[in-house]
């Protein structure tokens, strides 16, 4: 039996986190969703998780036969040997007989009624967990909606009084909504599928707090996974006044001695100007200090970054092979923001103290048509990282190579504690690069613009560009004074 003072796990990665530990025992919960949204698979997780800890489990099946359920479960890797299946699915002959089933009214039914079969199974199994799929099938067998609600209330009360935790599915339709059933249970979850992907939402959870919002749900060959949405208010930390450096003395001098631990630094500039290389300096320097570091690459592969870094003397290959530096290429359209946040959280839990996200344009693609949510999603992610004491480097590509100066293209300036910007310059027919600090929230910085080069020894930062004016336009003029 499941102890009364513990939560009941749904058995789905991430789902218990959303529910602050799982379901409350000996209560009933509704799982609503359309066809193909994953309701039955979630129920299989719920039952097999119980069987794994010694719970007695009962699957009451109104739609699929026991043989089909076991076959489908086996294909997904679920072991139902410890789960009793009560097969109440109709066969072809039962569709030809009217009123073959009467529902939960013992004084009006024959011995072969649904009521008797459910009661017999419950008395025999004495289940700790019951999954009913789908409960709304009973609605088609009831005389009217009132009778249906009464019968559902009676069934839930009967099972709960026996100490069972109940999960039942519903599939609402316009002519048969399931809103009334929410009042008859202790909690309600919703699974949905849209053009943006699958999601899980908690609609109601009596007696407990839960994580609100729509959380990404993914179905693969092994079942379901839930990726909880990061909530900034769930984490609370302070930025340290300790400064960490890049290992490039002149760059750290520009930054007033480096960037603060736990701060967010946006490194902005056009393509190829040195943003990723600069961020990689901070990563490799972190590892040199004995800290873990990680980079998520939306715009180039791990192999490409390793090759480029080795060419300029950065020990990325050595550090990744040692397991101190994590590199992960992210295909933007393959992950939702919640899934990506889960990847980032995993490396932080594994010890990463400096994290680079390269770059924000690729991250925006992961929103799958919801680009207006970019700032909100990034805000939640960097707030989580900052409050965990992790130093964040965001590489952002601005769209203009020269011309009017843009600190960022995605309006994320307010997220940054520091903004380090790069510019291409044309000087006497030659393309050159400049670097400067636009913002440093927690300390002083050098206001000069300096020339930047990428050499075989990494970044080279030159003297202040005192002989040029109009550098931010991209086409500066020589100062004749």
Image (cartoon, rainbow, N blue to C red):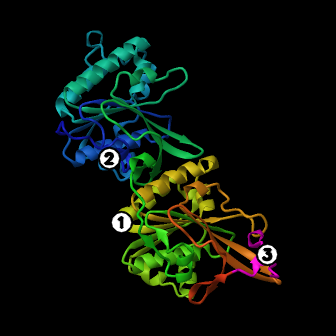
Residue carrying label 2: 11
Badge 3 or badge 1: first in the primary sequence: 1
Can you see residue 113?
Answer: no
> Do the residues bearing badges 1 and 2 touch, measured as CB atoms within 8 Å?
no
Which residues lie in the magenta part? 465-481
Badge 1 or badge 2: first in the primary sequence: 2
**Residue 418 on the magenta span:** no
Relative placement, left or right, of 51 versus 408 is left
**Residue 472 on the magenta span:** yes
Residue at disc 1, secondary structure: loop
Hey, which quadrant is residue 415 in on the image? Answer: bottom right
| 61 or 275, nearer to the observer | 275
Hey, which quadrant is residue 84 in on the image? Answer: top left
Marks 2/3: CA distance?
62 Å
Residue carrying label 3: 476
Of the numbered discs in the image, which one, if any, rests on residue 350?
1
Badge 2 or badge 3: first in the primary sequence: 2
What residue sits 20% from the left and 30% below the top? 163
């Amino acid at each position: 039996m499941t102890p009364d003072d513990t939560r009941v796990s749904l058995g789905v990665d991430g789902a218990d986190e959303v529910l602050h530990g799982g379901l409350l025992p000996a209560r009933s919960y509704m799982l609503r969703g359309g066809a193909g949204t994953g309701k039955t698979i979630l129920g299989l997780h719920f039952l097999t998780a119980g069987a794994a800890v010694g719970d007695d489990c009962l699957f009451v099946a109104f739609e699929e036969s026991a043989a089909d359920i076991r076959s489908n479960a086996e294909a997904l890797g679920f072991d139902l040997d410890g789960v009793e299946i009560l097969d109440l699915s109709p066969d072809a002959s039962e569709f030809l007989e009217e009123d073959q089933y009467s529902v939960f009214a013992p004084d009006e039914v024959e011995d072969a009624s649904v009521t008797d079969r459910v009661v017999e199974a419950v008395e025999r199994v004495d289940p700790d967990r019951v999954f009913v799929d789908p409960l709304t099938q009973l609605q088609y067998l009831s005389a009217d909606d009132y009778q249906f609600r009464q019968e559902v209330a009676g069934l839930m009360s009967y099972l709960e009084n026996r100490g069972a935790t109940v999960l039942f599915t519903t599939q609402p339709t316009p002519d048969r909504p399931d809103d009334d059933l929410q009042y008859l249970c202790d909690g309600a979850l919703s699974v949905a599928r849209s053009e943006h992907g699958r999601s899980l939402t908690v609609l109601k959870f009596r007696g407990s707090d839960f994580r609100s919002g729509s959380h990404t749900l993914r179905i693969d060959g092994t079942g379901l996974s839930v990726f909880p949405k990061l909530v900034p208010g769930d984490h609370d930390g302070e930025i340290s006044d300790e400064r960490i450096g890049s290992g490039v003395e002149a760059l750290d001098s520009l930054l007033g001695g480096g960037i603060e631990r736990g701060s967010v630094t946006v490194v902005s500039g056009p393509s190829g100007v040195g943003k990723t290389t600069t961020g990689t300096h901070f990563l490799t320097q972190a590892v040199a200090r004995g800290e873990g570091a990680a980079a998520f690459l939306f715009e180039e592969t791990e192999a490409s970054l390793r090759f480029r870094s080795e060419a300029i003397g950065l020990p990325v290959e050595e550090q990744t092979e040692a397991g101190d530096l994590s590199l992960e290429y992210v295909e933007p359209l393959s992950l939702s923001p919640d899934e990506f946040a889960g990847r980032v959280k995993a490396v932080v839990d594994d010890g990463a103290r400096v994290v680079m996200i390269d770059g924000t344009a690729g991250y925006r693609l992961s929103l799958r048509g919801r680009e207006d949510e970019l700032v909100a999603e990034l805000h939640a992610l960097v707030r989580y990282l900052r409050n965990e004491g992790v130093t964040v480097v965001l590489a952002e590509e601005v769209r203009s190579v020269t011309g009017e100066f843009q600190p960022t293209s995605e309006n994320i300036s307010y997220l940054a504690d520091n903004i380090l910007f790069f510019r291409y310059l044309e000087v006497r027919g030659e393309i050159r690069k400049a670097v400067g600090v636009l913002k440093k929230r927690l300390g002083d910085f050098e206001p000069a613009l300096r020339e930047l080069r990428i050499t075989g020894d990494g970044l080279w930062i030159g003297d202040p560009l005192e002989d040029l004016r109009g550098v931010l336009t991209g086409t500066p003029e020589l100062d004749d004074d």
